[in-house]
Image: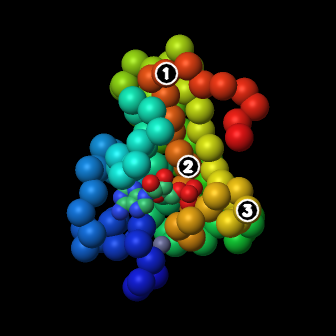
Amino acid sequence: MADCLFCRIIRNEVPSRKVYEDDHTFAFEDLNPQGPTHILVIPKKHIASLKDAKAEDAELVGRCYLTAAHIARERSIEDGYRTVLNVGPRAGQSVFHLHVHLIGGRNLQWPPG
Ligand code: AMP
Ligand code: ZN
């Protein structure tokens, strides 16, 4: 999508600290990290939000989580990490290209705020 921030990051039109890329997913450091590890995993296909995902996107959404698990393994944070997918403005979604937050490297409280 032309004017989507995360699509522009995938196209390298906006700089990012890339940590992983494959045919379907892309991952980069969050600008405002909430922990020692805070990475955003996004599908290369533009999907605005989880509520806009279609049945045909099931594998792609799953791949985003598997990419997060792969990065967590590489970063040695498997003793505890969290994947968060904010849906809608009331849940804090501020960028409307579906993204999974991978947060770890510190103790995480439950329930989240
Ligand atoms: P959310 O609030 O769930 O929509 O998450 C959006 C996330 O994107 C926030 O954690 C922001 O810090 C992060 N973010 C916004 N712009 C950028 C950017 N240009 N590069 C990296 N992370 C960003
Ligand atoms: Zn996009």
Q: Nearer the viewer, mark 2 or mark 3?
A: 3
50 relative to 94 in the view: left or right: right
Look at mark 3 in the image and give the residue it sits on: 90
- Residue 70 seen: no
The residue that appears at 42% across and 67% down in the rendered structure is: 6
Look at mark 2 in the image and give the residue it sits on: 100
First reached walking from the N terminus: tag 1 or tag 3: 3
Look at mark 1 in the image and give the residue it sits on: 106
The residue that appears at 34% across and 73% down in the rendered structure is: 8
In the figure, 99 relative to 75: above or below?
below
The residue that appears at 68% across and 66% down in the rendered structure is: 89
Cα separation between marks 2 and 1: 18 Å
Q: Nearer the viewer, mark 2 or mark 1?
A: 1
For disc 1, does the CB lie below 8 Å from ligand 1? no
Q: Judge by depth and name the residue closer to the eye, 102 or 43.
A: 102
Amino acid found under the numbered disc labelled 1:
Arg
Q: Secondary structure at mark 2?
A: strand
In the figure, 50 relative to 69: above or below?
below
The residue that appears at 73% across and 62% down in the rendered structure is: 90
First reached walking from the N terminus: tag 2 or tag 3: 3
Amino acid found under the numbered disc labelled 2:
Val
